[in-house]
Amino acid sequence: MGLFHSMNGRSGNLFEIVSNDDELIQKLVSNVKTRYAPHPVDESIRKLVEEIAQSLIRFGRAYYFLHDDIEQEEIRVASFSSDGVVRLFGMYIQWVPKRMERHWDRDDEELPREIRILDAAKIMRFDMPTSIKRMLSAQNRTLAVLDKHQFWGAKNYSQATHENPNPTNYFDFRVWRDTLDRALYRATRSTGWNGRKYDSSKHSDFFDCHRLIRFRRNQLLLRDDILNQLSRELSRVGKSYKVEFSVEISGTDQLPSVAHLNELEVRLAHEEVTFKEIIDYCYKL
């Protein structure tokens, strides 16, 4: 489920952008280089937030660099890897390993290691919110243990031998499987993630809806935090072009909200809302 996934194909203004220089915000955002192509500002922000979220989930941090195109009078924003990037006394230092540079008109060239000093005024940095980072860390530690021991139960079956071709097995694999499932559900309780057991017959509709609300709430909290960070970072880097520049980006009423999810959760506990209403809202956008 994406942060802005739409099941009904609705379109419109997803974000409210308040800035003291609309032309500069157009330059900063319209030419963001995502995995696709440049888009109108609203669409560029949507794709940028989704891309930042994916990087934060995988690496915990995301970096973007502003490239000034003097000839085209444009500002291009492109992501770069967080590997080897450290911040020291307000400066960004990037350690670049040996690498091969391919050329069509001559032999490939091996480039040496480099230490680059990056222009902090041109860098936008995004970090995973501490609360979500802690939840994911605790969840992933348990998942790593479960992955390591997922086939442990099979090792407890008695092996057939020539003398005893049909040995009696006292190990109850169903109990072992149930133990793993309980550990999985407890590990993912805070995040609400159900990627491994989304179709289990043991789930009740109440169980699925409560976890869906919890998972969607965490997504929206991450989305809103990224929007806040994006507002701060764009305001900061924009000051290189206009000293008093500022911008604030927030979601409009077309986007699902944490407040409404909280309301649905209370109504669900009191049996005042249908499962369909919850599912439709969670997959609204």
Image (spheres, grey):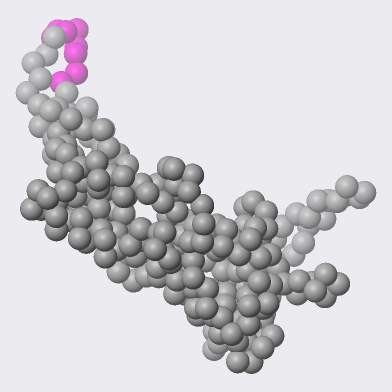
Q: Residue at x 75, y 54 (%)?
A: 100
Viewer-side residue, 108 vs 19:
19
Q: What x and y, as percent, mark residue 89?
A: 54, 89
Viewer-side residue, 45 vs 122:
45
Which residue is farthest right?
105
Q: Is residue 162 magenta?
A: yes
How many labels were placed on the picture?
0
Q: Residue at x 14, y 58 (%)?
A: 266
Q: Residue at x 41, y 59 (%)?
A: 254
Give the quarter of the image for residue 173: top left
Q: What x and y, as percent, mark residue 214?
A: 24, 55
Residue stretch rendered in magenta on the structure: 158-165
Q: What x and y, as percent, mark residue 284?
A: 37, 49
Q: What x and y, as percent, mark residue 12?
A: 52, 57
Q: Residue at x 36, y 47 (%)?
A: 283
From this viewpoint, is residue 167 visible? yes
**184 on left or right of 80:** left
From this viewpoint, is residue 96 visible? no
Viewer-side residue, 245 vs 144:
245
**148 on left or right of 173:** right
In the rendered view, would you say 60 is above or below 203?
below
**92 on left or right of 73:** left
**121 on left or right of 167:** right
Assign the magenta stretch its main secondary structure: loop
In the rendered view, would you say 227 is above or below 33?
below
Q: Is residue 264 magenta?
A: no
